[in-house]
Image (cartoon, rainbow, N blue to C red):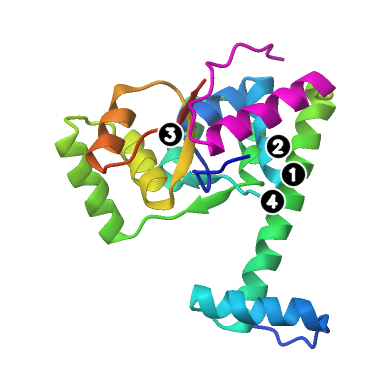
Amino acid sequence: MAVTRAGLVYGVGALRAAARGDRMVWAVHRAALAHGIVPVVPVSVIAEGFRTEARGDRIQDLLDGSEIEVMGADRARRVGELAVKASTTDLVAASVAETAARRNCAVVASRQNALGTAAGLLGHKLVLHAV
Amino acid sequence: MVVKRSVSLGDDVAAAVEVASREDGVSFSAWLSSAAERQLRVRQGLRGVAAFEAEAGSLTEEEIAAGEALLARLLSGASGMVSRVRRR
């Protein structure tokens, strides 16, 4: 398998899909772990996921096999500036795009224009599995 | 807090970790700790998958194969197909 992406980043859509029992999301999560790949979840995604989904137990099961990426002041500033350039108020999508670009990861998330726009501004071709 | 442990590694593993830690710019101990942390995360994650399966039913061989194929597509740089799968 020719690998051009180093791993996976989960957006809110991935957490929602997992909470709602999307079996493909669980299958790809299982596949990643089986290959020693620990998906990355920006901390802002977690806040939004728990805000909008009732099945917190399933989200937590997904997060147990994920790397939670915290955001310091410098990165928060970069994400905010990226959101301005991408003309979006969706800071969560901007943080997913920033993380995917910086860590050269593919993304599992809902289809959002903001994701592609933000990734493009960073010179990163968005590789997305839309849920 | 850091706990000191005496561990034994095979010659070849120790040499490979020496090289890898140098390349990654971290200490031998930090590299080993990071590898152990990742392995623990994988282990915990697979338990999470098992918890989902206990409630929603085991992933079938076809679903597992589809997950593997999707992962391969994503890592190769090709966007995955939109998920159209059963939910439970």
- Circles 1 and 3, Cβ within 8 Å, touching? The answer is no
Chain where mark 1 sits: A
Q: Is residue A47 above or below residue A6?
A: above
Q: Residues within 10 Å of mark 3 (few under 14, many from 20)?
A: some
Q: Residue A88 versus residue B16: which sits nearer the camera?
A: B16
Q: Are marks 3 and 2 on the same chain?
A: yes
Q: Is residue B3 magenta?
A: no
Sequence-earlier tag: 4 or 3: 4
Task: Check chain identity for marks 2 and 4: say if they share one.
Answer: yes
Task: Give the percent coordinates (x, y) of residue B85.
Answer: 65, 12
Q: Amino acid at mark 3?
A: Glu
Visible residue check, residue A55: no
Q: Which residue is mark 2?
A: A31
Question: Residue B53 at what x, y percent from top left?
Answer: 80, 28
**Span shown in magenta:** B61-88
Q: How many C-alpha atoms fall within 10 Å of the one at disc 2: few (<14), some, or many (≥20)? A: many
Query: Between tags 3 and 2, which lies in front?
Result: 2
Say which element carries label 3: helix
Q: Position of residue B27 (x, y in %)?
A: 56, 83
Mark 2, secondary structure of its residue: helix
For the point 75% across and 36% down, the residue is B49
> From mark 3 to mark 2, how far is it between C-alphas?
25 Å
Check disc 4 and report the residue beneath it.
Answer: A36
Q: Nearer the viewer, residue A119 or A5?
A: A5
